[in-house]
Amino acid sequence: MSMPESASCTAAYSVRNILDSSKVPLLLKNRADKWNITKTWTLEDWGQNIGFSKLLPFRCGQNFHTEEPQWESLCVKKDLTMRQFIDHCLSNDVSAEWLYFDYKHLNEWFQDNEDFLKDIDWGIVGFPERKKSDSTLWIGSKGAHTPCHVDTYGFNLIAQIYGQKQWFLFPPESGEILKATRVPYEESSIYSQINFFSPSEVESLDAYVVTLDPGDVLLVPNGWWHYVETISEAAISLNTWVPLASDAHKQLEEALVKLFVSSVCRLSSNASKILNPNESNLEDENILNYIQWATEASKKLSLDEKPPAAKRACLDLNELPEGISRLKIFPADQFRKILRLKRKNISKRSSTILQNDTDFELSRRLINAMCSQQVLATIASKITNE
């Protein structure tokens, strides 16, 4: 019996081709099982290899309801050892707070330990050139999460190493219903103002929902919104952002965002609320140089761009090789049930993180207006075409 044309065409593609071409999230079951850290390492092993006495900066959030998302700038920072983190995860009283050692580039945080995770190789999903130096580590306790956001550069590959994480994903066109905002500001991150950790109101939107188990790898295509939360006692994952040629266009838009945000911060008394902690040293004198560089890169890409190869149109993601699957879509009514359950499981105690502040609200609205996709695209087009 011959294979259907669409299936045979898809089967002819390598895993790399499929991930590079996909416009929807994909789950690759058990792809990271070959890594020793996935097969054998316990929390104790992680502590031993990182060093039980090494102090690590953990972001500490609250396991009770807040109206706004628990933005990074509003979380407490604590320097803890892996022994303290493990004891927290294994204790019977973890209801008060969650801990997250998140978004840590391995080559920056573990320079003194060359052997730590030196065997990381993303060849398991077709990208053997991406190694430890291109990877980022996330270690969190139950409840640790990243507010819903979208990354403007590249696409994201995530390997679940230990424990479980739940993901909510939404298509690129969901920005309006997700209440997109550039405050807090972080280059290449656009946040949603909806608090999916303890939602006050149930949004009417479809969602892709998946729980990652150890060994699973998830593809998050460029432009997809995602909310991520640890649902086991502890979870550890690694990820790598794979760059795209189209990033050059996005870098120009991000340079313009940096200019607008910097301008508002100079005039506002709320710069500390506007900026994420990693953007606290926003330097005005470098922004015009950044815009100049990004403009030239975007112009060059426009000249070099070619139509995609005809064979790419052949790829049919409804006929994927064994072990690779699309995520399940939860229609709005089913997704509402998931959100209601999450809200029910969070303590009824309520806290409002941000106080009403007229100056801050004006700054946020001004930034979001200047940084809307329509405005950025118009300005970028005029800069590159003149």
Image (cartoon, grey):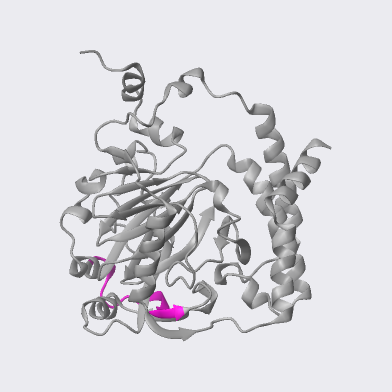
Compared with 235, 334 (above or below) is above
Residue pictured at 54% horizontal, 47% vertical: 172
Q: What stretch is highlighted in magenta?
A: 49-65
Asked if the magenta segment contains residue 53, the reply would be: yes
Residue pictured at 21% horizontal, 78% vertical: 90
**Seen from this angle, which residue lies furthest top?**
2
Residue pictured at 77% horizontal, 39% vertical: 384
Left or right side of 292 for 331: left
Q: Position of residue 138 (x, y in %)?
A: 36, 63
- Seen from the viewer's position, the closer of residues 89 and 313 is 313
Quarter of image, res 233: bottom left
Residue pictured at 20% horizontal, 47% vertical: 33
Left or right side of 136 for 186: right
Q: Where is residue 124 in the image (x, y as percent from the top left)?
A: 29, 40
- Seen from the viewer's position, the closer of residues 175 and 143 is 175
Q: Where is residue 134 in the image (x, y as percent from the top left)?
A: 42, 50
**Seen from this angle, which residue lies furthest front?**
333
**Seen from this angle, which residue lies furthest right?**
386
Q: In which quarter of the image is the N terminus?
A: top left
Compared with 319, 131 (above or below) is below
Q: In which quarter of the image is the C terminus?
A: top right
Quarter of image, res 229: bottom left
